[in-house]
Amino acid sequence: DLTELKYKKRYKTLKYLRLILHATFFLLFVYIFIRSRDPFNLIFNPFLKYDPLIFLTHFDTNLLLPVVLPVILTLIAGRFFCGWACPLGFLIDSLDFILKPIRKKFASKLILKSESLKNLIGKLTVFPPSFFLLGIVLVTIFNSVPLLQFLHPNIWIVRIFSLTTGGFIFLAVLFIMSMTGTRVWCRYLCPLGAFYAVLSKFSVFKLRLQKCSSCGLCEYDFPGTSSPSCPMKAVDYKNQRVYNHQCILCFNYEYRCPSEGFAYLPSIKSRELHYDPSRRDFIKQLMLFASGALIGSLTMTKRKTYKTKLLRPPGVTDEDLFVKRCLRCLQCVESCPNKIIRITGIEGGIPGLLTPHLVFDEYGCDYNCQVCQIVCPNSAIPLQTLAEKQQTKIGIARINRELCVVYKKKINCIVCEEFCPTTPKAIVITTKELILPDGTRTSLHYPEVDKNLCIGCGICEANCPVNKKAIRVYKV
């Protein structure tokens, strides 16, 4: 009838609109990632810069409006970001679609046969571990060893696109998850999703189940059917409830409901079939969040000063603040035109794991370049004026007289002085007259480093012609 046609058309339209927008945001992310690698055509990553959790790491009030906007939209519409805009969410949806035959052949049958497994999925859906992880993340954001950098979805997708080892491992984990269920990461582990899930509890519009025939199509993909089920398992048809903290407004299956039972309405206009125990559940979810916050607070030991011999990107002067704030997002690594920024392994200790450091093997830090400062989404690498950057010390160059050909072999070489970019030059030449063993006189030009002028840009080190560099930059 006409009412049924309107019902199906409404939710089909929402489904296809979501798919189009989600694909658009994913392609936008890909475009931004590619552009961010080009230092001469640079663009920052808004998926990181305008993220509300990342915003808490630096409190840049200039970004307040774009950061608050998705929060306001969530309070109005619900947990839309995960299903409509999240680039990792689109990647997971794609993996779920590709691996659906494997999942339906094994996982779906196992779930349908195991009552205990179904009960466990139901419990984890109502009380997801991501609430616990969100508690830990929010507390440790202010700690010297934060966890946000290792759990944030948009940082992980950058690592995947950057073709890092960690990115490939995470992608393999997503493959395994997609073989066992849909949106497993989003349902149970994502702290950003949990943040939006908490906000969606207070959203004006909510998806509700108004009537139900108990067909079960919204909860499980039955073997032999092509009907899509709720990817987040947010519908509990037995208790005739929609768990709005898990609902990502995908509208993938609502139009197939034989009872036309779903309604996306303002909360005050919705009608539950039974008593809604969501308030009681919310208290338990808050307890889950609080327990995570408590565990996170226990890791906050007395403030330590972390020392490292690694050279940090230009502008970084506070190692503690840098380690705490750095997202390990690899944007600076990918964007550096000279490719001198490297990923720190275990040599930097656990606090410094995956942070960027500088290596001057082939190139130095360009005197007029600020790319890493521009692309850093939360100013872990502070954005300075060019004049400030050119005066801030990365380290100090030191000459090894046992390797320098002037000191060791009495052969003139002033390459380091010629390439020194500072004004006045930080490498000065002292000329001395010498009588060689054969009796001839010569003038030798000895290079020396003025520690007050040297900024440790590494250009002298990169251009030193000696195989084993005679001049190197060291941490101040």
Image: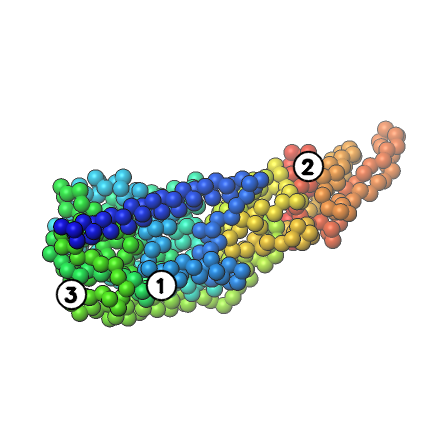
Q: Is residue 152 left or right of residue 416?
A: left
50 versus 94 height, above or below: below
- Which percent across, then down, holds residue 442? 86, 33
Q: Residues within 10 Å of mark 3 (few under 14, many from 20)?
A: some
The mark that comes first in sequence, 1 or 3, is 1
Rendered image: mark on residue 75: 1
* Residue with the most extreme top position: 438
Amino acid type, callout 1: Leu
Q: Quadrant of the C terminus?
A: bottom right
Amino acid type, callout 3: Leu
Residue at 59% from the left image edge and 54% from the top image edge: 383
Asked if disc 2 and disc 3 are in contact, CB closer than 8 Å, the reply is no
Q: Is residue 312 left or right of residue 282?
A: right
Rendered image: mark on residue 416: none
Q: For marks 2 and 1, give the CA distance.
A: 59 Å
The mark that comes first in sequence, 2 or 3, is 3
Q: Quadrant of residue 62?
A: bottom right
Residue on which disc 2 sits: 464
Residue on which disc 3 sits: 273
Q: Nearer the viewer, residue 70 or 289?
A: 70
Q: Which color scheme did the rendering employ for the protein?
A: rainbow
Q: Residues within 10 Å of mark 2 (few under 14, many from 20)?
A: many
Q: For marks 2 and 3, give the CA distance.
A: 78 Å
Residue 123 in sight from this viewpoint: no
Q: Nearer the viewer, residue 352 or 327?
A: 327
Residue at 21% from the left image edge and 69% from the top image edge: 277
Q: Is residue 257 left or right of residue 393?
A: left
